[in-house]
Image: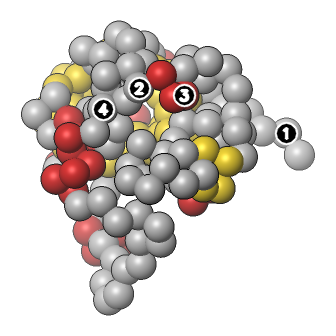
Amino acid sequence: MQINLRQIATIKSPFCELTNMPVQPCGASEIYAHIEFKEEFAEGLKDLEGFSHVYLIYYFHKIEKHQLSVIPFNDTTNTPRGVFSTRTPMHPNSIGLSVVELVDVQNNIVTIKGVDILDGTPLLDIKPYIENFDKIEGEVKNGWMKSSSQEVSAIRSDERFVK
């Protein structure tokens, strides 16, 4: 099987260092960024402006190693966790996923809000958030994650996952 992923755009954010960044979009609710799409993909942005939120699928381009066990920023017990039970960037394929607010679409530039992503990050895909499909009804379990959204909003990255 051949996997052929291409960068379709570049995320331009105010975060130029891997440290002292919000670690989840809820910690960056007032942070704006732009996504500059390659001209060859601009036509694909037609009708996107009708959505309030989008999923961003991107590549953690500054991560040079992966780990199968990590201590996530949001774990107040400092317990090593299996990487697949975390949202750390240390996953084997270094793929990131964020839900952000869509602010504007102009030509090949998309403005977003609620961004916890490093400047220059390659975007692999963008998809609309659709409440009728994506909202989870009923009981939701959060595993080891016990931090409140307020606690997560206050957390900033440190040297933990830098090289």
Give SS at disc 2. loop
For marks 4 and 1 on the same chain, the one whose residue lies earlier in the sequence: 1
Quadrant housing the C terminus: top right
133 over 63 or under it: above or below: below
- Where's residue 48, x and y in %? 26, 43
Q: Judge the density around disc 3: few (<14), some (14-19), many (≥20) Cα neighbours within 10 Å.
A: many
Give SS at disc 3. helix
* Residue type of the residue flagged with mark 2: Asp
The nearer-to-camera label among 4 and 1 is 4
For marks 4 and 3 on the same chain, the one whose residue lies earlier in the sequence: 4
Q: Residue furthest right?
A: 1
For marks 1 and 2 on the same chain, the one whose residue lies earlier in the sequence: 1
Q: Which residue is mark 4?
A: 156
Q: Residue at x 47, y 72 (%)?
A: 143
> Disc 1 versus disc 3: distance between alpha carbons?
29 Å
For marks 1 and 3 on the same chain, the one whose residue lies earlier in the sequence: 1
85 over 135 or under it: above or below: above
Q: Which residue is mark 3?
A: 161
Q: Quadrant of residue 18?
A: top left
Q: Residue at x 20, y 40 (%)?
A: 154
Q: Do the numbered discs 2 and 4 sit on residues whose CB atoms are within 8 Å?
A: yes
Foreground of the two, 33 or 68: 68
Q: Do the numbered discs 1 and 3 sit on residues whose CB atoms are within 8 Å?
A: no
Give SS at disc 4. loop
> Disc 2 versus disc 4: distance between alpha carbons?
7 Å
Q: Do the numbered discs 4 and 1 sit on residues whose CB atoms are within 8 Å?
A: no
Q: Which mark is residue 134?
A: none
- Where's residue 51, x and y in %? 20, 51
Give SS at disc 1. loop
* Residue type of the residue flagged with mark 4: Arg
Residue 5 in sight in this render: yes
